[in-house]
Image: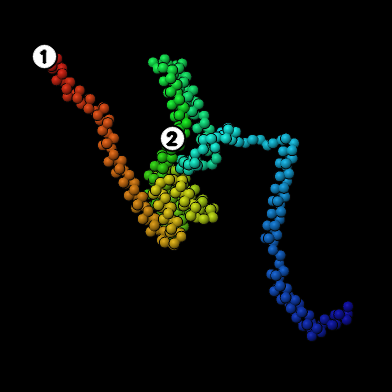
Amino acid sequence: MTAFAEWITQPQNLFAVIAAVLVFATVLTLSAPSMKSDNLSKRMKQVANRREELRRKSREALEREKASGLRGKDTRSPFRKVVESLNLQKLLEDPNLKTKLIQAGMRGQGPVFAFYFARFVMPFILFAVAALYLFFVNDFDLTGMQRLTIAMGSAVLGYYAPALYLSNIGQKRRESIMQAFPDALDLLLICVEAGMSIEAAFQKVAGEIGSSSIELAEELSLTNAELAYLQERRLAYENLAARTGHPGVKAVATALIQAERYGTPLGQALRVMAKENRDMRMSAAEKKAAALPAKLTVPMIVFFLPVLFLVIMGPAALNYQNM
């Protein structure tokens, strides 16, 4: 120990030890990044292993329940049970049903099964109600074949009633959207020219336009969500056009897609589209105003002219009777 103390206290040996420590520290510092383990990959691998383990346990539990005859609670809706048990989707297939439901604001699988269930049940209900009313409630002066024909007509009406109801809801929703769509484009143009991103602009306009059209606010919010989560932004604009089903919205969606694809100024495209939609709304109002005289012709002939003849010819007829 005394010899080591004497050796370390010598200046040349002390400088050599300090130099060796500094060299070792330098080498360790330079080689530390290469020797550092990838904690992120390790954690992700552990998560993947845990996921596979849970999946394997869940699969084994389901197989055991199936083997023992015990099944989980059936959480399907009554409409879905009836539709799937009778295979009504193939029997009453409507290729445009999903598009009509989306344009009516109904999303998910629930409205699909409810529509097929209503299309299957409504003919029987209306036929039973019409037959009960015609044959038992009121004694009409009709033959049995005529009453049966009216009841069958009611059944046919029940088959098409769900589709008519769905089309009516979609039409009202489309009109509500298009009434506020030009104003929404003006607000969107202001937001974009103020420096906001298209996602922030959609979110801002959705919050402001809700007082005028709840349906349009819902569609803009959904488009904003799709812009954030879909892999291609083009699909978000195409879905907006498909959900509304209006040529004006389709033109705006096409302009937005082209603006992002070719790098054209977004504000200029929105300004042109806002003017076109405003002109489209004005032309629709002018079209309704121009069709008003033709629509009033029949009510005037049926209701106004008889009263007018009575007022004009009534005093003359009374004077003639007095004479």
State left or right for residue 117 relative to residue 167.
Answer: right
Answer few, some or many: residues within 10 Å of disc 2's Cα (few below 14, many 20 plus, some between 14 and 19): few
Q: Which residue is tagged 1? A: 323
Residue 82 sits above or below residue 248 on the image: above
State left or right for residue 310 relative to residue 253.
Answer: left
Measuring from the top left, give residue 73's x and y in whole percent.
66, 35
User: Distance between the Cα atoms at labels 1 and 2?
Assistant: 60 Å
Foreground residue, 141 or 26? Answer: 141
| Residue at position x 42%, y 50% in the image | 250
**In this view of the protein, can residue 285 be seen by the observer?**
yes
| Residue at position x 60%, y 36% in the image | 76
Colour mapping: rainbow
State left or right for residue 296 relative to residue 217.
Answer: left
Badge 1 amino acid: Met
What element does badge 1 sit on?
Answer: loop
| Residue at position x 36%, y 55% in the image | 272
Q: Which residue is tagged 2? A: 164
**In this view of the protein, can residue 220 be seen by the observer?**
no
| Residue at position x 41%, y 55% in the image | 255
Badge 2 amino acid: Leu
Measuring from the top left, give residue 279's x and y in whole percent.
32, 49
Measuring from the top left, give residue 30's x and y in whole percent.
69, 74
Foreground residue, 313 or 209? Answer: 313
Earlier residue among tags 1 and 2: 2
Name the quadrant of the N terminus.
Answer: bottom right
